[in-house]
Image (cartoon, grey):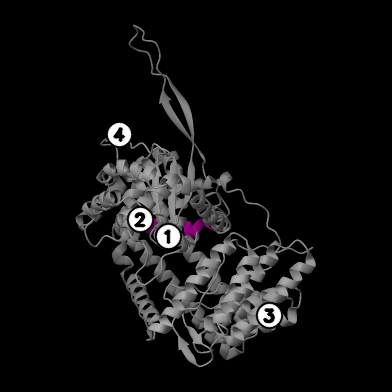
């Protein structure tokens, strides 16, 4: 039988603006996510991709859970302004409501006394404590490392928080709560697994390489002393496994990934809802892949020491602060160059693919406009890549532009990047690299202007209307309840989720987001169905509720939801091999055009895959 698979995490999605009933506008929380077009995507079960083969482990870290709960008690509130706390954060706060007041006060005093000065963000405040968490021993002892000059200065600043964390763990009931907390973190890890695998595959495919997962260290052998003075010192080799740990952090500051390297272990601490394809996580994995290559070819890099130092000296003369470590500069530059080129090439491919679909049935005048629009989009992508490289260059990646050009030349060759690294290192011109910022000034200025224009446009679109207190309270209740139902869906309790959503319809009888959520629930339940008849019934229910969502939605304020509902129906019809209806749904979304939060690109892709 046919079977389709969906991400475990849902997905409950809410448009940024909509209507009450059919005439009156309603308020919506600013943090509400956008409807996902991917929930009802029927597809065959993919072959398993073993992340550990490529050094990656998605790991629940008890020390981090304990540390962040202690910070929550100390007063670090990572909830964005104007947003409700997540379901998990709210649960932790309830669990800590009866914490000993004296202990809470001591936690708060330490945190307040050691706060970083402005303009440090909440993520900056938490970062030092994340480092401390990874340095502690396992619970229940949570032993702190010995104070030493070898410890990072930022960790030393908060090292004395460790005894308070140990006391917090023993007196807050955390040991009993850890089972429940761990399940929530495991659910987030499950959500991360599939998109992480896609990101790892894409990066390694781009580099045409496999990561070095075992490091070999050359160490001296202690031998019995002899009277001979000419004895050569003996050496042996020792191997270490290298790991790239992705650690969920449900209490972390949203949108900020903490990245740590401890010997051969790389840690990416990711907050809830993180997209593994985001640049920060991708760059972290690129560093994991590239660092051992820099070590492997350290002699060839050392041969160009003076030329690299010339570029670093030019940056210092310009007033920049750069590291004198040439190997660190090369590593940073390789990561920055690879990441910029990877992102530029993928975005260019998507724009080109969209244009190809549009041109298939375009008239001559339309075709010329499409080509012009596509050329402008590709030029903007190149400018943005240059601006990102310039940012990295100013932070010390002084060969970033050079390596980006080298990656562009070899990325389609199909050969392992490590085969080219020696040649790449031998080719750069220090005089040109020292002058890169002047060379790209015009393109960077265009990219910065485009960024500002996007921010201004987004601010204009996202500016919330004025609502009454009653309307705002009603919307907040709905968003909170939908968030709670999402947690139920993550546990795959589909009947309970459906029952809760139907109960919501009694109070929100014409609410398109509830219909949309019901449709997604049926779609995800269909993914787990083993009986064809049950699967068909669930898909039919999904189609019905997507249709109801479209009918209840406002064409003025719910355009993103309508767009994504049409694409979702198109995918289901395509799975059911009803290509005529699928084409109609995709065409509806295409006719709506590009909408912030909509599914225009997904509609083009879905339409192109249908049989002619």
In the rendered structure, which disc, 2 or 3, sits on the residue that comes first in sequence? Answer: 2
Image location (x, y in percent) of residue 590: 60, 83
Mark 1 to mark 2: distance in Å? 9 Å
Mark 4 to mark 2: distance in Å? 26 Å
In the rendered structure, which disc, 3 or 1, sits on the residue that comes first in sequence? Answer: 1
152 on left or right of 402: left
Residue 314, by quadrant, is bottom left
Whether pointer 1 and pointer 2 mark residues with C-beta atoms closer than 8 Å, the reply is yes
Whether residue 432 is visible to the viewer of this picture, yes or no, is: no
The residue positioned 54% from the left and 63% from the top of the image is 487
Where disc 4 sits, the SS reads loop
* Residue that carries the numbered disc 4 in the rendered image: 146
* Residue that carries the numbered disc 1 in the rendered image: 89
Whether pointer 4 and pointer 2 mark residues with C-beta atoms closer than 8 Å, the reply is no
* Residue that carries the numbered disc 3 in the rendered image: 544
Where disc 2 sits, the SS reads helix
Q: Nearer the viewer, mark 1 or mark 4?
A: 1
Whether residue 270 is visible to the viewer of this picture, yes or no, is: yes
Mark 3 to mark 1: distance in Å? 35 Å
36 on left or right of 145: right
Image location (x, y in percent) of residue 191: 55, 58
Read off the magenta span. 397-411
Whether pointer 3 and pointer 4 mark residues with C-beta atoms closer than 8 Å, the reply is no
Pick the residue in front: 593 or 291. 593
Residue 30, by quadrant, is bottom left
Mark 1 to mark 4: distance in Å? 32 Å
């Amino acid at each position: 039988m046919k079977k389709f698979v969906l991400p475990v995490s849902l997905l409950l999605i809410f448009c940024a603006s909509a209507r009450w009933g059919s005439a009156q506008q309603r308020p919506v929380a600013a943090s509400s996510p956008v409807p996902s077009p991917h929930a009802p995507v029927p597809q065959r079960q993919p072959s398993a991709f073993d992340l550990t083969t490529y050094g990656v482990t998605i790991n629940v870290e008890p020390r981090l859970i304990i540390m962040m709960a202690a910070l929550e008690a100390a007063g670090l509130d990572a909830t964005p302004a104007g947003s409700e706390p997540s379901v998990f954060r709210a649960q932790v706060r309830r669990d800590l409501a009866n914490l000993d007041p004296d202990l809470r006060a001591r936690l708060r005093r330490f945190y307040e006394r050691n706060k970083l000065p402005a303009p440090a963000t909440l993520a900056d405040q938490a970062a030092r404590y994340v480092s401390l968490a990874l340095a502690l021993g396992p619970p229940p002892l949570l032993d702190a490392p010995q104070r030493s000059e070898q410890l990072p200065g930022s960790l030393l600043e908060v090292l004395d928080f460790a005894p308070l964390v140990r006391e917090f763990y023993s007196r807050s009931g955390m040991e009993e709560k850890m089972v429940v907390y761990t399940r929530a973190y495991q659910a987030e890890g499950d959500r991360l697994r599939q998109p992480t695998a896609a990101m790892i595959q894409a990066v390694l495919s781009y580099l045409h390489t496999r990561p070095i997962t075992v490091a070999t260290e050359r160490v001296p052998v202690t031998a019995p002393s002899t009277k001979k003075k000419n004895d050569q010192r003996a050496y042996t080799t020792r191997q270490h496994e290298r790991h790239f740990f992705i650690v969920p952090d449900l209490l972390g500051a949203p949108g900020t990934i903490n990245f740590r390297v401890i010997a051969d272990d790389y840690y990416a601490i990711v907050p809830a809802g993180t997209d593994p394809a985001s640049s920060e996580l991708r760059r972290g994995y690129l560093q994991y892949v590239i660092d051992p290559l820099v070590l492997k070819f350290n002699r060839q890099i050392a041969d160009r020491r003076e030329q690299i130092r010339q570029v670093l000296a030019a940056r210092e003369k310009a007033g920049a602060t750069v590291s004198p470590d040439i190997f660190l500069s090369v590593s940073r530059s390789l990561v920055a160059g690879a990441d910029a080129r990877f992102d530029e090439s993928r975005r260019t491919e998507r724009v080109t693919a969209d244009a190809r679909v549009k041109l298939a049935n375009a008239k001559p005048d339309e075709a010329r406009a499409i080509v012009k629009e596509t050329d402008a989009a590709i030029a903007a992508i190149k400018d943005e890549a240059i601006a990102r490289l310039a940012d990295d260059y100013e932070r010390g990646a002084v060969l970033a532009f050079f390596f980006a050009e080298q990656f562009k030349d070899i990325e389609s060759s199909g050969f392992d990047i490590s085969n080219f690294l020696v040649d790449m290192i031998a080719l750069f011109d220090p005089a040109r690299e020292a002058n890169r910022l002047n060379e790209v000034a015009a393109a960077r200025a265009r990219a910065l202007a485009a960024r500002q224009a996007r921010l201004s446009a987004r601010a204009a679109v996202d500016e919330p209307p004025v609502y009454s207190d009653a309307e705002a309270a009603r919307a907040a209740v709905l968003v909170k309840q939908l968030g709670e139902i999402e947690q139920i869906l993550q546990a795959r309790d589909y009947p309970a989720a459906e029952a809760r959503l139907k109960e919501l319809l009694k109070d929100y009888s014409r609410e398109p987001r509830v219909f949309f959520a019901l449709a997604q629930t049926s779609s995800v339940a269909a993914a787990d169905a083993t009986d064809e008849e049950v699967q068909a019934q669930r898909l039919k229910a999904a189609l019905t509720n997507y249709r109801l969502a479209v009918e209840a939605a406002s064409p003025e304020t719910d355009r993103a939801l309508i767009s994504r509902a049409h694409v979702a129906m198109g995918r289901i019809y395509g799975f059911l091999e009803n290509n005529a209806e699928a084409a109609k749904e995709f065409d509806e979304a295409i006719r709506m055009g590009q909408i912030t939060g909509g599914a225009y690109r997904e509609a083009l892709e879905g339409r192109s895959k249908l049989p002619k």
